[in-house]
Every structure is written in structure tokens, then in C-alpha cells.
DNA sequence: CTGCAAGTTCAAGCCGACTTGAGGTCAAGC
DNA sequence: GCTTGACCTCAAGTCGGCTTGAACTTGCAG
């Protein structure tokens, strides 16, 4: 259970070394010290990074995640509850879209927009859906 | 049921005119013609934009949405099914994170990372969570 | 000792999704 | 017929989240 270097942390988490340095700079993770120049991380950082990945995949910004993970004496419960509620809404949206896609697979209408069921989904979607940039997929650090 | 101009479309959907022009350029929406210089849109574009908003909120890129919405003679069912499965995974992730947040509210451990339940969530989250940029919230076009 | 792979810093670049600003054009109202 | 203001185009800028490249430092193997 000794501290691990950045390459090992990258290997265990699938997060690139450059991203790990960036995370440290942003305060999302901490290194326990250095061996020469090289950063050392506690093994528990692996779990912390899982949580960060989960937050990212759920659409939170790094700053928001930092806030949720902060050790601050006053971690705001109300804010967490609000986040949870927001997640519930997003879950509903995703479920609706999933149902829409599955219906689209089975649907015989010539195009999605001509399918009344799909248009119903569209109508439900409404104005309130928040803008959000596109995902980018993980790319491996060149060997 | 006459065609509407870009300002009206923006008003009905909450999407800024500049974004609508960008969407047209990317082929996500089409204008039916011009009145002078001004674009005209069919009223059904409102629904289409709802769908686009839903897709965005669900983490799809504009290109992916364009593909899903395409009228193409061969809209790939397998791909849609894959998207639906992906959504299911994302829904699971979000539910897990939501449960984690709710537990955090109730939890007595001094910090999230010291709570065994939360660490369990972190462990489940695993490596497979895809990287994804942060949401940006909608900002209204200056009056 | 020396070499070198694997780390380091820092600045600059990239991507998607828009927004902003400058300068131009048009249809409608006076 | 002229102004006005809503819309137009096009290029450049912004933002978050990294990645990349150049130049440098180390600990360890030989």
C-alpha cells in the first residue's frame, strides 16, 4: 500500500497523466509528495478518480465535482439535495430519449419526425432542457 | 400555420438566434426560404428543436443528433439500439451518483471519502465512465 | 560515472458549440 | 423616398478540459 507514481495511477484509472496533473492543479486530487521530481499519490486516489469520472459522466463540471468532494467543514446539504433532484430530472430525460430511440427502431414511419409517438416525445422535451457541450471520448496517451 | 422568422423561433424555443443559424449551417434544421434576407422556418421546427435540446441534455453531440434525426433512407437501427443501451448505462450511473449524493446528505462521516458507503459507490463507478466536458448553462441573448 | 527512460514545467494549441462585433441589406412605416 | 431596425454574413473570440511540444531534471541500471 505504498504511494504510486503518476504512470501507475494513470494505468489503474485510465486517466492520462496530463489530465492527472491538470486535476492536481485544479485541486481535485493531491499528491502526497515527490520522489525527486516525480509526484507520488496515495492508492486511495484511485477511488477518488472513479468518483470524479462518475461525476464527469453525469455532466458535472470539474469545479462542481471539486465542491462535492471538498472536505470543507460546511458541505452544503441543501446544495447536494438540489444536485440529486437535478440528477433525477436528467434521469427522466434520458429515459424518455431512450424510449424514443427504442421506438424509433420499431417504428414504421418514414422518418422520426413523422412518427406521432416520437413527436410526442419531442413535445414533452420542451424548452427546459439545458444546453450542454458534447462528450469527447477518451483517447489513450500515445505509447 | 405560416412560416415564422428566426426571432419568433428563438422566442418559442428559447434557443438564441445565433445558435439557430449555427444549427442550420450544421444541417440540424432547415429554413423553408427567405423573405428578403430573413430566414423563414416551418412551425414544426419548434418540435425538432425540442428534440435537439433533449439530445443535447442527454449528452449527444450535434453531429450525433443530426445522425439520429436524419431522414436518410437507411437510418441504422443497430446504431440506435446501441445508443439506447448507452443511455441505459448512463441512467444507471446517474442513479448511482444521485444515491451517493443523497446518502452524503444523511451521512455522518467527516468527509465523503471517509464514508464506506460512498467509497463503495466510487468503486462501482470504475474506469469505464467516459470523459465528458462540463455543461454550460443557457445564457439569454442580450436584449 | 554515464546514459536514458520517465518524469517535470510552461506556454501554446485544439475541439465543440456557440457568441460577439463590424459592417451590409432589406421591407415596411412614415 | 428615406429612415429605421430587424435581420444578414463572416471572421474572430470564448470557455472548459485537456493535449502537445520543447526544453529540462532525476533516479537508477550498467
Image (cartoon, coloured by chain):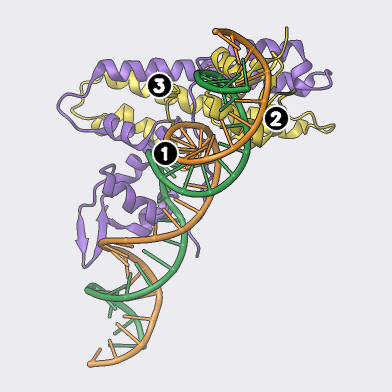
Chain colours: A purple, B yellow, C orange, D green
Q: Secondary structure at mark 1?
A: helix
Instruction: Determine whether A87 is above or below C9 in the image.
Output: above
What residue lies at 40% left-to-right and 31% top-to-bottom? A60
Q: Quick check: marks 1 and 2 in contact, CB under 8 Å?
A: no
Left or right, A142 with respect to B88, comes to left
Q: Is residue B131 visible?
A: no
What residue is pinned by disc 1?
A: A53
Q: Quick check: marks 3 and 2 in contact, CB under 8 Å?
A: no
Q: Secondary structure at mark 2?
A: helix
Rendered location of residue A63, percent (x, y):
31, 35
Rendered location of residue A113, percent (x, y):
74, 19
Spatial separation of the CA atoms under disc 1 and disc 3 = 14 Å
Spatial separation of the CA atoms under disc 3 and disc 2 = 28 Å
Q: Residues within 10 Å of mark 1 (few under 14, many from 20)?
A: many
What residue lies at 35% left-to-right and 45% top-to-bottom? A46
Q: Quick check: marks 1 and 3 in contact, CB under 8 Å?
A: no
Q: Which mark is residue B98?
A: 3
What residue lies at 54% left-to-right and 14% top-to-bottom? B11
Q: Secondary structure at mark 3?
A: helix
| Dot placed on the residue nearer the N-terminal end, 3 or 2 | 2
Q: Residues within 10 Å of mark 3 (few under 14, many from 20)?
A: many
B38, A18: nearer the viewer: B38
Q: Chain of mark 1?
A: A
Instruction: Determine whether A29 is above or below B35 in the image.
Output: below
Question: Residue A100 is drawn in which quadrant?
Answer: top right
Q: How many marks on residues?
A: 3
Left or right, A41 with respect to A105, comes to left
Rendered location of residue A14, percent (x, y):
45, 50
Spatial separation of the CA atoms under disc 1 and disc 2 = 27 Å
What residue is pinned by disc 2?
A: B68
Closer to viewer: mark 3 or mark 2: 2
Closer to viewer: mark 1 or mark 2: 2
Amino acid at each position: 500500500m505504498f504511494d504510486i507514481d503518476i504512470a501507475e495511477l494513470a494505468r489503474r484509472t485510465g486517466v492520462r497523466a496530463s489530465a492527472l496533473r491538470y486535476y492536481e492543479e485544479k485541486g481535485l486530487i493531491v499528491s502526497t509528495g515527490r520522489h525527486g521530481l516525480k509526484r507520488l499519490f496515495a492508492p486511495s486516489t484511485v477511488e477518488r478518480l472513479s468518483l470524479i469520472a462518475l461525476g464527469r459522466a453525469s455532466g458535472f463540471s470539474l469545479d462542481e465535482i471539486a465542491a462535492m468532494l471538498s472536505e470543507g467543514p460546511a458541505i452544503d446539504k441543501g446544495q447536494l439535495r438540489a444536485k440529486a433532484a437535478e440528477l433525477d430530472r436528467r434521469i427522466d430525460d434520458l429515459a424518455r430519449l431512450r424510449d424514443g430511440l427504442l421506438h424509433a427502431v420499431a417504428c414504421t414511419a418514414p422518418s422520426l419526425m413523422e412518427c406521432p409517438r416520437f413527436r410526442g416525445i419531442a413535445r414533452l422535451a420542451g424548452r427546459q432542457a439545458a444546453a450542454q457541450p458534447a462528450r469527447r471520448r477518451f483517447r489513450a496517451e500515445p505509447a
